[in-house]
Image (cartoon, rainbow, N blue to C red):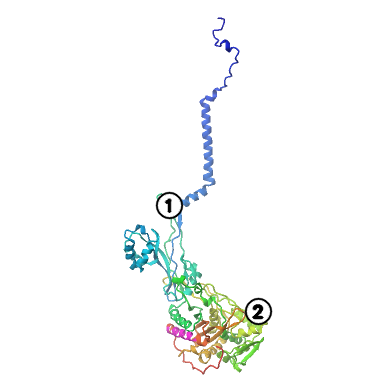
Amino acid sequence: MGSSPYSFRTPRDRNRLPTKQPRVFGWANSLKFRAVLVWGVLISAMGCLVVNLFYVQIVQGSLLRGIAQSHQVTQIRPFMPRRNIVDRDGNILALDRPVFTLYAHPKLFKLSKEEVAEKLSPIIERPAASLVKQFNEGDTGIQVEYSLIEDISNRVTELRLDGLELIPHQQRLYPHKEVAADIVGFVDGEHVGQAGLELSQQNILTRPSQEIRLRQMGDGSLMPDQIPAGFLNQDDLQLRLTLDTRLQRAIQPILQKQVTNVGAKKGTVIVMDAYTGELLTLASYPSYDPNQYYKAKPERYKTWAITDLYEPGSTFKPINVAIALENKTVTPDTLIDNPSVISIDDWPINGGSGGSDTVTNVVINSYNVGMVHIVDTLKPEVYYAWLRRLGLGGVVGVDLPSESPGQFKSRKTFLESHIDRAVTAFGQGFSLTPMKLVQLHATIANGGKLVTPHVIQGLFDSKGRLYWRPGLPAQRQVFSPATTKAILPMMEGVVRQGTGKAAQLPGYHVAGKTGTSQKANGFGGYSESAYVTSFVAIFPADKPRYVVLAVIDEPAGGGYGGTIAAPVVKEVLQVLTALENIPPSVPGEVGAESEGGTD
């Protein structure tokens, strides 16, 4: 045939180029390559995992651990009742008590709404019809009553009615209601003090509580994880005051009656121990019930005896005379020129006898003109320095919130203006709080020391042991005992034969001073119809112990301190002698009628 037996090409294929075959490497299909590839992938994955673990465990470990624990662990601070407030004899003025909020869930009732209402009505003392109306407001979570006492809540529980729920909580209770309300104050729904001592002593009245840590279990239940030692212990400390609730309760209606009878805006009575500064009484009218504080006007929440300023009028005259005596510019028997009217800086000043009078008679009869001439015996700069030394223009420092500082002229104005010094002589042209006036008169009662009025004795336990006492400023000697001893007979003469005879108390020596001051009209002058009447007493005058002040603001139809405020003080002294067992003095002689005066 002429062809090779080994050739497969046909004649047609001889001129075709051979097809290029793919180049195949033998190792690509080997097991070794596959193993290397797998190991490479695994090592890369392991590397990524290690890097990720490092990032999670080391870089973000603390953060993620905290997030995890926050979901597993919770911290709570158990509620601790506030400490009680008690008076000087341990009578409770404020305490926490357990109460219950009653909720209704009508969809869970097994009885009709009418039947549930009928059973509940006599227990919570609400008409059944009003309860049914309330039940119709929704299917669940209806608040029926907010503060059921424990006895009532027990009776509700005994009904065994499905769909009623009692939630316990604490409520602040003020057993004496209006009595001492503006001293004690009140707390809001969050148990935070909003007025009085409840506000100013918030940290003292709040018992410390420790946080406990709870861990959430797999089933959602909470188990204690860390409990501080003694976290359930509750101290028995209570805040004891200087107040005498018996006296406060007796004085409140006396004050209310007089304010109402004379149509006044308001009134206050203060009784203070002149030697210690302890306040036995701080009564105000109108007042409010701290158990229902939301029903009162907010302006009643304040203790106006320390927040409101007024011009003291003639009750300041004994203080001015004490300054003159201390500086030896006059004696009790010094004759003072006392014409009926004088003019200073073209301003007329009335209220003189028309002749001459001793310093003692000027005080007894409350002569304005005579007082101007007594003060004029002092150098203006000396007089100003004394008034500042006594604290005019400042605060008393009483342990109640929102005390207002007094208002007093600048030194330059005072020294350059004769009329400013003249009106200061009879207690006008400057303002102070009733509490400041009590502090000043205490210096006359106690031998010349400036004490700090206060209502807090301290924290005591149930056995009467002292745990904490607030610090008080050291008493400061401002007048000599000789000066104050000379002032007392003058003030006793005011009650015996002068403008304060309405405060006479048979069998007792009473020293006092009346005051009637015009109120500023807001236009740089004084109102012709608005007055503040007051009377301050030192009692007993022969053995001084107490300072008593009554202030009646804006009695309708006018009046004077001797006719409006002095009778209030007399009734207060009657109660005080009975409660404190003060023995009678040698009966003092009741003198002639007052020669006159402006009070």
Using the image as rendered, state which of residue 240 and residue 284 is in the foreground.
284
The structure residue drawn at horizontal position 53% and vertical position 27%, both measured from the top left corner, is: 33
What is the number of the mark on residue 216?
1
What is the x, y in percent for residue 346? 66, 87
Q: Within the magenta stretch, is there residue 575?
A: yes
Label 2 element class: helix
Q: Amino acid at mark 1?
A: Gln
Q: Do labels 2 and 1 touch, CB within 8 Å?
A: no
Q: Amino acid at mark 2?
A: Arg
**Image: magenta residue range:** 566-578
Label 1 element class: strand
What is the x, y in percent for residue 97? 40, 67
What is the x, y in percent for residue 416? 68, 82
Examine the rendered structure and indicate whether residue 212 appears above or below residue 83. Answer: above
Q: Where is the N terminus found, in terms of image quarters?
A: top right
Q: Where is the C terminus found, in terms of image quarters?
A: bottom right
Decide if residue 315 is in sight here. no
Structural crowding at the residue carrying mark 2, measured as other residues with C-alpha within 10 Å and reported as few (<14), some (14–19) or many (≥20): few
Magenta stretch: dominant secondary structure: helix
What is the number of the mark on residue 411?
2
Examine the rendered structure and indicate whether residue 127 appears above or below residue 586. Answer: above
Q: CA distance from mark 2 to mark 1?
A: 70 Å
Quarter of the image for residue 525 reads bottom right
What is the x, y in percent for residue 339? 62, 93
Q: Earlier in the sequence, mark 2 or mark 1?
A: 1
Q: Within the magenta stretch, is there residue 574?
A: yes
